[in-house]
Image: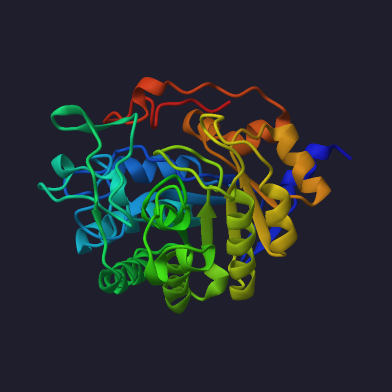
Amino acid sequence: MNQRSSLFNPLKLGALTLPNRIIMAPLTRCRADDGHVPSDIMAEYYSQRATAGLIVAEATMVMEGNSAFWREPGIYSDAQVAGWRKVTDAVHAKGGLIFLQLWHGGRATHPLLNNGQQPVAPSAIAIEGDEVHTPEGKKPYVTPRELRDDELPGVVEGFSKAAQNAKAAGFDGVEVHGANGYLLDEFLRDGANKRTGAYGGPIENRARLLLEVTDAAISVWGADRVGVRISPLNSFNSMSDSDPVGVTTYVATQLAKRGVAYLHLMRADFFGVQQGDVVSPARAAFPGVLMGNMGYAPADAAEAVVSGMLDAVAFGHHYVSNPDLVERVRVGASFAEPDAATFYSQGPAGYTDYPTL
C-alpha cells in the first residue's frame, strides 16, 4: 500500500467524519471588509479549498477592539455573522466542512487599529523586535495594560458569545486559538505571564483562562465540535516558556478529560529559537484526535499518521497557493509556491487566482 494513502482514510473527529486527514490550517489573509465583515471573495476562497478534510477558518475576533491585522474578520456583529454565513454556505455547497477559529489578539493588537484603545495582556510586557502594520505604516508594539482578575469573566463571555454567533453563522464547530502569542497563549506561557494570583504562577493557573474559554465553547457546541490549538515552542510574538513539554502535557491532559474533538499542535518554532519534541508528550497525554502542523510535507504527514503519532495534519503555507491541495497530494503532483507579497493585501491577486491542476 502507498503510505500516502493513509492521508485518505476517513477520520472520526468528534461529531464529524472527515473524508480525509488533510486539514486546511487557519491562515490570516486580511480580506474582510470595513467593520471586519467577511467579504464575498472570502466565500469564493474557502469554497475553492472545500476538498480539505476540514477547513479551520482564519483567526477571528471574538470581541470588538482587538484588531491586530487591520482587515481581519470578526464574529461579534450581526453583519459579521451574515458574512460568515455566505462562507459556510459556499463551503457546504461543495461538500466541505469548516470550523471557525475563535481569537483574541491580546498584546499583539495596536491602538492605531482600535480607535486608540490600549492592548491588554496577562502582564504589562510588550512584544519586542517586531512591528505591526497600521494605517500609518509599520509601528512598534506598545506596552499592554495588565488585565485584572475581575475582567477575565468578561473575556470568557466574549468567547462564549462568539461561539454562539459561529453556530448562527453555520459553522460545523469552533477551534479555540491558544497559540502564537495571542491572549490565551500569553496567559499560558511563562515568558509573557508574570502575574500572581489565580491566573499566574504554576501551569495549573496559567492554563486556567484557556480552559475556561474551552469550557465556554463546549457549553455552546458540545465537546465533540470544539478543537484547541497550542504552540508550546513557537517564539513568534516574543513568546517563550521555561518548560514547553510541561505546558504541552498539562494542556493535553486537561483537554483529554474534556473529550474535545481534537488538539491542534504546532510542533516547532517559526524562528528555530526554541527546540524540542512536543509531539510525543502530546500523543502520550491525548488519546483523541491529534492534529499536527508546521512544515509537514505529504510524505512526513503520511508517516506520522501511519505510525499513529498523529491522526491528521494541517497544511498552511501550501494551502495559500494550492486550492486543490488534496488532489495534488493524491496524485503526487508538485505544489505551487505562494506569493508572499499578497499574503495580507486586498483583492483577488494571490488569493482566489491560484490555478488548479
Query: Could you say where residue 129 lies in the image, as x and y percent from the top left?
Result: 34, 29
Place residue 334 in its image quadrant: top right
Q: Say which residue appears at 38% left-offset and 31% top-offset.
A: 351
Q: Judge left or right: residue 127 versus residue 309.
A: left
Query: Could you say where residue 11 lies in the image, as x and y percent from the top left?
Result: 70, 58
**How many labels, in total?**
0
The residue closer to the viewer here, 220 or 20, is: 220
Quadrant (top left/top right/bottom left/bottom right) for the C terminus: top right
The residue closer to the viewer here, 310 or 186, is: 186
Which residue sits furthest bottom? 219
Place residue 159 in its image quadrant: bottom left
Which residue sits furthest left? 115
The residue closer to the viewer here, 105 or 60, is: 105
Q: Say which residue appears at 44% left-offset and 47% top-offset.
A: 191
Q: Say which residue appears at 82% left-offset and 47% top-offset.
A: 307
The residue closer to the viewer here, 177 or 246, is: 246
Observer able to see residue 268: yes
Query: Could you say where residue 87 lies in the image, as x and y percent from the top left?
Result: 37, 52
32 to 87, vertically: above or below: above
Q: Say which residue appears at 62% left-offset and 36% top-offset.
A: 275
Q: Judge left or right: residue 121 versus residue 338.
A: left
Place residue 296 in its image quadrant: top right
Q: Judge left or right: residue 114 versus residue 89.
A: left
Q: Judge left or right: residue 346 versus residue 114.
A: right
